[in-house]
Image (cartoon, rainbow, N blue to C red):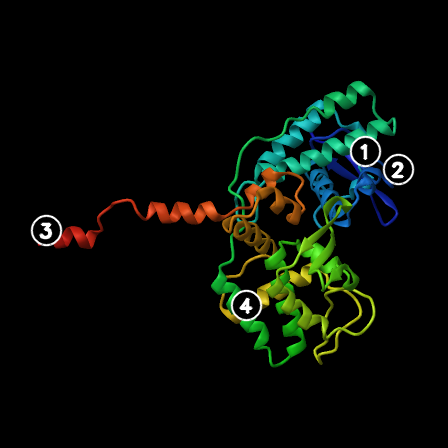
């Protein structure tokens, strides 16, 4: 497919930009009205979903549009998505399939398909805005998902690792208040399986200390109640005792002087907290989501019902919850070790 030319504004002037895998006029000088990309992104309920899918659209746009060195790819809101046809979307699918990570590994099928979902959705909104005919939409949106499977990322965090992390938090002599907060956060996520976004969005009023329940608003703006282990509740209560009176976020930043701030933590702060405490405890660094894997694995290991685990985790399906179970990895490794195979030392001993 030959490259064609669009326009990208710079300093108030039109700039000729070669466009690949797309038709002429794909890049707009300004945001159109109506704007399919903006309408689609705004239709998503959670801020995280809006951010993620806008990023996916931006990446798809970058595959279609080549800009001069030093120039930025135009935002999704300045792309005429309704001009795409079957041959363009098929070329986009092929290009996504060849994309690689910074480590040189091919993108996973699930990650590629996220971009294709964003593409199909923005085409659908283009049709709803009557910018495309029904036939053009059907043909352009007829993009098959990429097939394949990757082993799920993540791991279960061992009991000894949790012990070391909590000890590291308590040993924080430079900022004991921050240490109590970090211990409470880690204990809560380990014992309930809540997502990092759910933990930082939780309010003080959402926690019922008498019943040991925490009201969570999760993905899709869905509210649920999670039950807090009595030992995790002790860590949480220790943190609550340090909070100023009155309503507010459950988890908050702590100033270097030990003063608890009024605002809530950011999701990225949870990653920083866990990475920092892992380093201090000399534990292999894991992600906040690994605590979610750990909760589900531990819950099922003690005989918990997978349907109840699904409810606690806030998953849409039992199959998703089952996919978080990391017990099979341990069992498989232990079973493999039972297989017979002589070592070089054993064979040398037999030959001597």
Residue picked out by circle 2: 32
Judge left or right: residue 311 versus residue 137: left
Q: Where 278 falls versus 152 (above or below)?
A: below
- Front residue of 233 and 42: 233
Is label 1 in contact with label 3 (beta carbons under 8 Å)? no
Dot 2 falls on a residue whose secondary structure is: loop
Q: Bin the neighbour count of mark 4 within 10 Å (Cα to Cα): few under 14, some 14-19, many 20 and up.
A: many
In the displayed orientation, state which residue is furthest to the left.
352
The one nearer the camera, 195 or 50, is 195
- Disc 4 from disc 2: Cα separation: 52 Å
Comes first in the chain, label 4 or label 2: 2
Counting from the top left corner in percent of width and height, residue 26 is at 79, 33
Question: Within the image, what quadrant is residue 28 found in?
Answer: top right
How dense is the environment of label 3, judged by Cα within 10 Å: few (below 14), some, or many (20 and up)?
A: few
> Mark 2 and mark 3: span between their CA atoms?
81 Å
Q: Which mark is residue 200?
A: none
For mark 1, does the 10 Å Cα neighbourhood hold few (<14), some (14 to 19), or many (20 or more) residues? many
- Where residue 323 appears, as percent x and y from the top left, is 55, 42
Is residue 19 something one can see in this rendering?
Answer: no
Marks 4 and 2 close (CB-CB < 8 Å): no
CA separation, marks 1 and 3?
76 Å
Residue where numbered disc 1 is placed? 80
- Which residue is nearer to you in this view: 178 or 58? 178
Label 1, label 2: how far apart the Cα atoms are:
8 Å
Q: Disc 1 vs disc 2: Cβ atoms closer than 8 Å?
A: yes
Label 3: which residue?
Answer: 351
Mark toward the start of the polypeptide (1 vs 2): 2
Q: Nearer the viewer, residue 286 or 329?
A: 329
On the image, numbered disc 4 is attached to which residue?
165
Q: Look at discs 4 and 1 and give the one toward the viewer.
A: 4
Are the residues tagged 2 and 3 within 8 Å (C-beta)? no
């Amino acid at each position: 497919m030959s490259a064609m030319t669009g326009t990208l504004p710079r300093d108030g002037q039109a700039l000729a930009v070669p466009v690949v895998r797309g038709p002429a006029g794909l890049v707009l000088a300004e945001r159109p009205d109506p704007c399919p990309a903006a309408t689609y992104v705004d239709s998503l309920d959670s801020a995280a979903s809006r951010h993620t899918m806008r990023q996916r659209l931006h990446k798809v746009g970058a595959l279609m549009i080549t800009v001069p060195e030093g120039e930025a790819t135009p935002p999704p809101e300045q792309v005429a998505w309704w001009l795409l046809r079957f041959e363009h979307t098929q070329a986009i699918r092929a290009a996504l399939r060849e994309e690689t990570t910074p480590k040189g590994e091919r993108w996973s099928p699930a990650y590629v398909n996220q971009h294709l979902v964003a593409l199909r959705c923005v085409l659908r909104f283009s049709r709803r805005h009557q910018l495309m005919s029904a036939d053009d939409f059907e043909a352009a949106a007829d993009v098959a998902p990429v097939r394949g499977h990757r082993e799920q990322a993540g791991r279960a965090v061992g009991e000894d690792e949790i012990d070391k992390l909590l000890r590291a938090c308590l040993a924080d002599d430079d900022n004991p208040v921050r240490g109590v907060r970090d211990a409470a956060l880690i204990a809560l996520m380990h014992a309930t399986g809540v997502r990092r976004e759910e933990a930082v969005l939780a309010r003080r009023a959402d926690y019922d200390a008498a019943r040991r329940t925490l009201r969570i608003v999760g993905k899709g703006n869905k509210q649920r109640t999670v039950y807090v282990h009595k030992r995790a509740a002790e860590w949480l209560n220790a943190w609550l005792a340090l909070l100023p009176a009155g309503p507010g976020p459950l988890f908050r930043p702590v100033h270097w002087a030990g003063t608890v701030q009024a605002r809530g933590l950011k999701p990225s702060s949870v990653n920083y907290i866990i990475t920092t405490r892992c380093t201090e405890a000399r534990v292999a660094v894991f992600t906040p989501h690994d605590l979610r894997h750990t909760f589900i694995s531990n819950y099922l290991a003690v005989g918990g019902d997978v349907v109840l685990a699904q409810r606690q985790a806030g998953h849409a399906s039992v199959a998703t919850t089952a996919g978080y179970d990391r017990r099979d990895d341990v069992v498989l490794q232990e079973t493999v070790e039972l297989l017979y195979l002589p070592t070089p030392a054993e064979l040398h001993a037999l030959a001597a």
